[in-house]
Amino acid sequence: MNPPAIEIDFYYGIGSRYSYLASTQLEGIARSYACRFRWLPLFSGRLIAADGTDPFAGAPVSGQYDWTYRQRDAEAWAASYGVPFHEPRGRRMDAERLALACVAAGRLGLAEPFSRRLFATIFASDRAVIGQEACDEAARDLGIDAARFRALTDEPATAALHDARLTEARARSAFGVPTFCVGDAVFWGNDRLPLLRHHLWRLRAAAAAVSPAR
């Protein structure tokens, strides 16, 4: 008998370059470790600012947050993964609206395919403006009426779900995106994916060690 699939909660920001980069690796991880990712979108700006500090506001607080460094770093990761990356800096994007749209898609059970479409629009195209029109296109691609989807995005229940998710993420020690939670274990950042893989390998090895002999 195969062990049950491990569930991993994936908290991400749709406008986050590192959330995008990490998302391109999830299918491979899921296959390798028989795990399942729960896509949990949120507006990362509010998550980051919740503790009263925002390293992205004003001048970079360190070289790690310098925009030129971050662009080069993201481009290097994309090259390593073999995925496209187009720097979105300077383009008009309502990240909070996009996050709510992803939450609305999640209410329909479509958070992953909807978010993948928006990720591609943001990070693999050169569109100058990424807003409601991009959400409408992604919805139509998934067979959802655009007007109905706009209404769902604007429902108070969608905002309430988003706010509850922010509270939940903070309670689980998430302070930025992407954050991966496997039970009580927390891994932050695209660059922690090797540690997530190792953790999953250990869980699988432990499960195999206690499984009954056939």
Image (cartoon, helix red, strand yellow):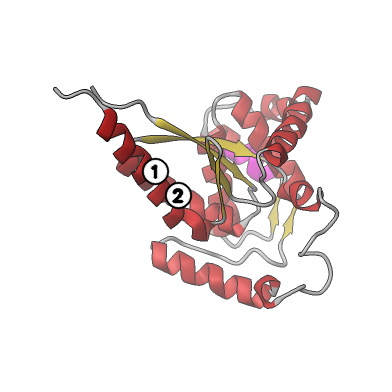
Closer to the camera, 110 or 19? 19
- Residue span colored magenta: 132-138
Q: Name the quadrant of the C terminus.
A: top left
Taking 34 as reference, is 127 above or below it? below
Q: Name the quadrant of the N terminus.
A: top left
Q: Which mark is residue 200?
A: 1
Helix, strand or loop status at disc 1:
helix
Label 2 neighbourhood size at 10 Å, few (<14), some (14-19), many (20+)? many
Closer to the camera, 33 or 71? 33
Q: Is residue 100 left or right of residue 30?
A: right
Q: Callout 2, which amino acid?
A: Leu
- 214 in magenta: no
Taking 49 as reference, is 91 above or below it? below
Q: Quadrant of residue 62?
A: bottom right
Magenta stretch, main secondary structure, is helix
Between the C-alphas of marks 1 and 2, the distance is 6 Å
For label 2, the residue is 196
**Quick one: which residue is furthest to the front in this view?**
210
Residue 34 picture location, percent across and down: 33, 35
CB atoms of marks 1 and 2 within 8 Å? yes
Closer to the camera, 172 or 116? 172
- At 64% from the left and 37% from the top, the residue drawn is 102
